[in-house]
């Protein structure tokens, strides 16, 4: 640009540099392309789905916790794992109203401190769930492959020790999320997103998601069940098969829900750092895939009680017994369930399998 001042011609060169990272970070993922349609879809889709997930997940997981606590005298190592799985789901669930409000209002109105906790609890719940699934897989492997050799080690003390290890490890892995998820300034007002100090922590976040949260657990489960399934086909133990069926169902649902999110998040990371996508249609599709996959992934916290209901016969009976003590209107169901339960009480008392799966 040229300007004439007091007979002199002054040439002024103006250079503007844009930081495109902000368009691919956080919950809104602003971009130079028009994304208003994507954001409108996001608000409607997330609000409806998160509301349903919150209600179903809260009721279902509270029932799981209550059933396990009520029958704690019959608790096994598998029950302890299922108890911690329900707690990790509840930790995830209590954050959903915050995300729903953030999506509807388009501003983070809960302060910086709660933003730190929301990001940290979300990550802790995710890693705790996956670590518990790994423990349950290894436990099934030891029981079925090595049998009575490990029976004496499957005690309440072992379960408590594993609980401490799993939660401690989950908190340690999630510590950067507690630190770097913070209130930020966005075009529409305050936001809440993972904002690391340097690129190394961004790489850590992606690596932890995909390596600790996907690749390594999947490898462990494939290796273990490649040995477990042939053994079960030979011995045909109905009790062991029910427990394995429950655990495999939980794992399949978990990976089906979380794998698309991890892949979408990885693509966003590559785009923000290496600009692999340069057309608006592709950018729109990537953002839309992240919104949908993230929302579906967050629904995992309400699926486990549904799986228990379909796979675990004893779980349904004990839910009836529990609800009958709270709601007088289902006394009849209690008597029916009690009669059914009493016919099998002898075998159940001798069983070393899960409280929820018999």
Image (tube, helix red, strand yellow):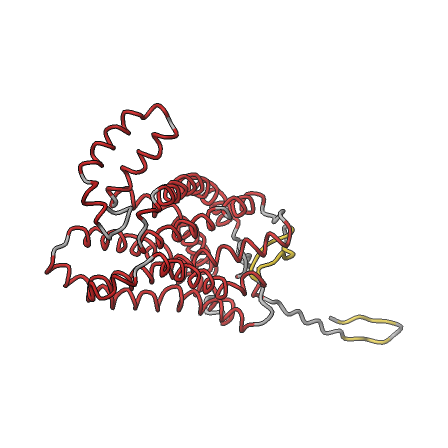
Residue 248 x, y percent position in the rendering: 26, 55
127, 159: nearer the viewer:
159
Instruction: Identify whether 255 is placed above or below 204.
Output: above
Q: Quadrant of residue 117?
A: bottom right
49, 94: nearer the viewer:
94
Q: Quadrant of residue 211?
A: bottom left
Residue 155 x, y percent position in the rendering: 32, 58
Q: Is residue 64 left or right of residue 276?
A: left
The quarter of the rendered structure image containing the N terminus is bottom right
Residue 201 x, y percent position in the rendering: 54, 70
Identify the residue at horizontal 62%, vertical 48% (top origin). Answer: 110
Residue 23 visible in the snapshot: no
Instruction: Identify whether 296 is placed above or below 25.
Output: above
107, 249: nearer the viewer:
249
Residue 187 x, y percent position in the rendering: 64, 54
Instruction: Identify whether 331 is placed above or below 116.
Output: above
């Amino acid at each position: 640009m040229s300007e004439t001042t007091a007979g002199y011609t002054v040439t002024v060169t103006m250079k503007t540099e844009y930081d495109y990272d902000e368009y691919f970070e956080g919950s809104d993922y602003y971009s130079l392309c028009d994304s208003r349609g994507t954001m409108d879809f996001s608000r409607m889709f997330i609000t409806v789905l998160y509301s349903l997930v919150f209600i179903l997940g809260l009721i279902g997981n509270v029932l799981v916790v209550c059933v396990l606590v009520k029958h704690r005298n019959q608790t096994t190592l598998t029950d302890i794992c299922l108890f911690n799985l329900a707690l990790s789901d509840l930790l995830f669930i209590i954050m959903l109203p915050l995300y729903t409000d953030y999506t509807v209002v388009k501003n983070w109105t809960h302060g910086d401190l709660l933003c730190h906790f929301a990001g940290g609890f979300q990550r802790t719940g995710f890693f705790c769930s996956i670590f518990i699934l790994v423990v349950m897989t290894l436990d099934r492997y030891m029981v079925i492959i090595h049998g009575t050799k490990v029976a004496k080690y499957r005690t309440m003390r072992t379960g408590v020790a594993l609980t401490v290890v799993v939660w401690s490890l989950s908190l340690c892995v999630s510590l950067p999320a507690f630190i770097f998820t913070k209130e930020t300034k966005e075009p529409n007002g305050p936001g809440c997103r993972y904002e690391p100090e340097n690129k190394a922590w961004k790489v850590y976040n992606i690596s932890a998601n995909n390596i600790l949260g996907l690749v390594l657990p999947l490898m462990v489960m494939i290796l273990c069940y490649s040995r477990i399934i042939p053994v079960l086909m030979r011995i045909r133990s109905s009790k062991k098969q029910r427990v394995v069926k429950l655990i495999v169902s939980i794992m399949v649902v978990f990976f089906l829900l979380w794998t698309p999110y991890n892949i979408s998040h990885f693509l966003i990371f590559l785009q923000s750092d290496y600009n692999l996508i340069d057309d608006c249609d592709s950018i729109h599709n990537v953002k839309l895939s992240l919104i949908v996959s993230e929302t579906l992934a967050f629904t995992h916290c309400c699926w486990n009680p549904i799986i228990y209901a379909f796979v675990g016969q004893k779980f349904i009976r004990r839910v009836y017994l529990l609800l009958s003590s709270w709601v007088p209107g289902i006394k009849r169901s209690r008597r029916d369930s009690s009669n059914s339960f009493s016919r099998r009480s002898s075998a159940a008392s001798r069983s070393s399998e899960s409280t929820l799966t018999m």
